[in-house]
Each structure stands twice: as structure tokens, then as C-alpha cells.
Image (spheres, grey):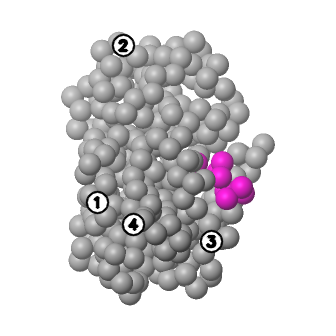
Amino acid sequence: MKRTAVFALIPALLLFSQDADAKATADKPSMVVCYTTGSVNVREARKATRSMLKVLEKIGGWDEGTFKSYFTTSYKDCGKYLADKKPHFIIPSLGFYLEHRKSDHLVPLAQPRVNGGSTDTWRVLVRKGEFKSLDDLKGKTLGGTLCTEPRFLKKVVFRGAVDPEKFFKLKPSKRALRPLRNLAAGRLDAVLINNQQYEALGSLPFAKDLEAVFTSKPMPLPGVFADARRSDQKERERFRKAMIAFCGHPDGKSFCELFGIDRFAQVNTADFDAAQALWDK
């Protein structure tokens, strides 16, 4: 389940760092990682983010130390940094992007490819034979790392079919494996997982005892976004090209392998527009 930390990384926010000279800092882009829907070792993630920036600086021809980084697993803190630090670029969760897309003028630059695809699928797992459908889970406990954004679940994942905060007893978790163990042991009724977490189930001894009673429609993997008010077209294109070349760089390749990313590629804007249409309903 360690590789479920991927999105995380994708989630990553490019922000301005605090500095003794506030004016100089205001002109200096930097990077923050907002990983709000998965489990990750914060210390390792911060280190990985700094390493990522160094590689991007090399690829894009920026001076060493051009970018600063900040990492958070808190949805609230991610919004606070977005408001306070005025970032040029951001890679948040899909739900965060949809909420802030219009108010913060976010435009997609690059998107990860995982197992050859650019979309994700979320599932609700239960113990085999205990529940037959999503309707059977009304009033039951739903756990997992993906339960931290109920508005996104309602609008995009469940497409308005249920309101998670009213339909379930939500049990968010910072750990991906713990809620699955609790499900297998009968301490949870259901667990919500994404596609990477689902594919990692095969390594768990109790995987054969679980089944999905709900599978979402495909939704875009979150990618790299820019604030169109604070970055010009030339800057955005430079950063986009650096991201697309990132996994092909010797140092970037090891980073991408760690998080299960094939590469970063051109964004399929139609996928994001479809998700936005659901959000705006």
C-alpha cells in the first residue's frame, strides 16, 4: 500500500516562501505539496518535493534554489497557503482544484499517467456477501483516506446519488491500510479506495474476503495547475515542458517510479471540464 502515496504528489502547490525580504520573496515562485486524500510519510514527502524541484530547475534551466517548497496533508492549510502565499502553480487534489478553479483562475498544465491512463476510479469495498449495493449502506460506517472531502464525494464520485455526510457515518483516516484491516475485522462496514489502492489489494491476505458494491465513473487524475493571474504564458509553458520531461530525467525517473507515475503528459482538458460540470450542478 506504500505506493498509494502517489497522489500525493499529485498533489503539489507552487507557492511563495516566507523570507526576510518580503518583496523579493513575492517575486520568487516556490512549490507546496497538498496531499489531502491519501496516506504519506510527511517527512519523506517533503524531502521528495525538494528533490523534485531541484530536478525541475535543471530541466527548465532555472538557477539552483529558484523554487522553495511547502508540503501539507491538510485541506484547510492548503487553502490557507493558496490565499496567503499567492502561488504561481499548484498540484492539489481534484476536489480542491474544482473548488478553487474559478476563484483562483487555475488552468491545467500537465497531468500524470499511471499504468498508461490519466483517469482514476473510486470504489466502495465491503465484506463479501454482507451488503449488495450502495443503498444497503445507509447509516453505516464508511472509512478510508478519501473521506476527507465529502462535497467532492457527493458531486463527483457519487454524482449526487447520495450525500455522504448524511448517508454514511464517515470515518476519515490518514492511513490507507488501517481502514482496510478494520473492514476485514468488522470494525467498519465499508471503505472507499482509489484505483491504486484497489490494485494494491492483492498483497493483503484478506483481499479475497472483500468486494466492491460501488464503482465510480472515471475521473481525471489531478495534475499541475497554474494561477493565470500570477504566471504569464511563457512561464507556464516553461514549467509545463519541464514537468513533461521530468520522468525522463535520470533523477526524475526514480522519483516517478517511487510514486507509480509513468510520466507527465499533455492535459486532457475535456476530462477536467466534465468533472467541473458535475461540481457546478
| Residue under pointer 2 | 187
| Residue under pointer 3 | 230
Disc 3, SS: loop
Q: Is residue 7 above or below residue 116?
A: above
Q: Residue at (46%, 69%) from the top-left corner?
A: 21
- Name the foreground residue: 139 vs 238: 238
Density class for disc 4 (Cα within 10 Å; few <14, some 14-19, many ≥20) is: many
| Residue under pointer 1 | 48
Residue 239 visible to an observer of this rendering: yes
Mark closest to the chain's N terminus, 1 or 3: 1
Mark closest to the chain's N terminus, 4 or 2: 4
Mark closest to the chain's N terminus, 3 or 2: 2
Three-letter residue code for mark 1? Ala
Separation of residues labelled 4 and 2 (CA atoms) = 42 Å
Q: Dots 4 and 3: beta carbons under 8 Å?
A: no
Separation of residues labelled 4 and 1 (CA atoms) = 13 Å
Separation of residues labelled 4 and 3 (CA atoms) = 16 Å
Residue 85 position within the rendered picture, expressed as x and y whole percent measured from the top left = 54, 59
Quadrant in the picture for residue 252? bottom left
Residue 102 position within the rendered picture, expressed as x and y whole percent measured from the top left = 72, 57
| Residue under pointer 4 | 68
Residue 6 located within the stretch drawn in magenta: no
Query: Which of the two marks, 3 or 2, is nearer to us in this view?
Result: 3
